[in-house]
């Protein structure tokens, strides 16, 4: 599937949905149209039981996403009023990504900057090639990185490292990003695709209801206590206990074979 005039690609294989930001000539800078395409894909995949995990990646070998498309800034983000409209136009894609109920893996190589880092932080797991570079250049553009994005950054790296990244606007390499908690794993560039493929395959082979429940519970833990949906957590736990997959897991264990989970 091609969206945003081919700037966003979506494919499905063996329970894994792959979304590719496809503007290598602009280091995969993300445009308003790409945000709209992302919303379309994720909304469709949310209810597709054949898709168990999603991988996000960038086309080419230079970037995951280098940030928002700065060429749209003058027209669409020229002042506070324009920024509000830009936020409205992109909110569907951003919310679909943040609220997607299935695991998302960010497969990162090259530049992962600004809005690109925000996309990566919305993923559940971030696996990066050793050539990846990370940064938030907001201070060099005279703009403020959004509240939710900074909150995610602080939750991953802590306030001290978040301040360093935001105040300086400096880029850091994959090794440093791993050290401060921004990444789950750093791998050789040439091994990135195979390692992410194996990871996605492992997750896709596990019980979907169990994995989704784990994601839900972790997300709720990260919220303020007053904002937590304990009823949703309880429902997810009950759904797992009453599922065919739970019976299949027990049976497979007793029969000493690999379970076959169907997500129900």
Image (spheres, rainbow, N blue to C red):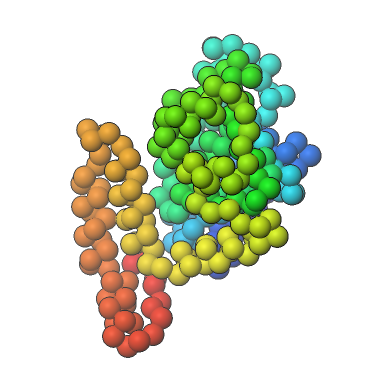
> Is 244 positioned to the left or the right of 65 in the image?
left
**In the picture shown, does residue 141 fall above or below 180?**
above
Q: Nearer the viewer, residue 184 or 213?
A: 184
Q: Position of residue 206 (x, y in %)?
A: 41, 68
**In the picture shown, does residue 261 fall above or below 16?**
below
Outermost residue, right side? 25
Please state, as top left, top right, bottom left or bottom right, where the C terminus lies in the image: bottom left
Residue sitting at 54 percent across and 12 percent down?
A: 80
Residue sitting at 60 percent across and 33 percent down?
A: 135
Residue sitting at 46 percent across and 34 percent down?
A: 153
**In the picture shown, does residue 11 fall above or below 140?**
below
> Is 111 positioned to the left or the right of 120 in the image?
right
Q: Position of residue 59 (x, y in %)?
A: 71, 48
Q: Nearer the viewer, residue 112 or 258?
A: 112
Residue sitting at 54 percent across and 22 percent down?
A: 167
Residue 32 placement: quadrant:
top right
The answer to whether any part of residue 259 appears in the image is yes
> Is 92 positioned to the left or the right of 130 in the image?
left
Residue 198 placement: quadrant:
bottom right
Q: Position of residue 148 (x, y in %)?
A: 43, 30
The answer to whether any part of residue 43 appears in the image is no
Q: Position of residue 213 (x, y in %)?
A: 32, 56
> Is 125 positioned to the left or the right of 173 in the image?
left
Q: Nearer the viewer, residue 115 or 182?
A: 182
**In the picture shown, does residue 128 fall above or below 144?**
below
Q: How many marks?
A: 0
């Amino acid at each position: 599937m091609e969206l945003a005039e081919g700037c966003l690609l979506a494919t499905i294989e063996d329970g894994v949905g792959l979304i590719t930001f496809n503007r290598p000539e602009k280091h995969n800078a993300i445009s308003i149209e790409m945000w709209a395409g992302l919303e379309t894909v994720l909304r469709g995949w949310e209810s597709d039981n054949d898709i168990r995990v999603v991988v996000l990646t960038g086309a080419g070998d230079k970037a995951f996403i280098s940030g928002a498309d700065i060429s749209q800034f003058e027209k669409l983000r020229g002042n506070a009023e324009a920024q509000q409209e830009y936020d409205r136009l992109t909110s569907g894609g951003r919310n679909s990504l943040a609220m997607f109920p299935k695991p998302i893996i960010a497969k990162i190589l090259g530049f992962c900057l600004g809005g690109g880092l925000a996309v990566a932080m919305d993923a559940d797991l971030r696996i990066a090639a050793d050539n990846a570079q990370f940064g938030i250049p907001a201070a060099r553009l005279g703009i403020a990185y959004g509240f939710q994005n900074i909150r995610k950054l602080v939750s991953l790296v802590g306030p001290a490292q978040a301040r360093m990244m935001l105040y300086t606007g400096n880029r850091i390499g994959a090794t440093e990003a791993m050290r401060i908690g921004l990444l789950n794993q750093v791998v050789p560039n040439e091994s990135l695709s195979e390692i992410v493929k194996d990871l996605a395959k492992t997750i896709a082979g596990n019980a979907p209801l169990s994995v989704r429940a784990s994601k839900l519970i972790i997300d709720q833990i990260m919220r303020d206590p007053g904002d937590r949906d304990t009823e949703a957590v309880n429902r997810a736990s009950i759904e797992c206990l009453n599922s065919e997959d739970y019976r299949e897991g027990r049976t497979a264990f007793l029969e000493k074979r690999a379970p076959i989970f169907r997500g129900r």
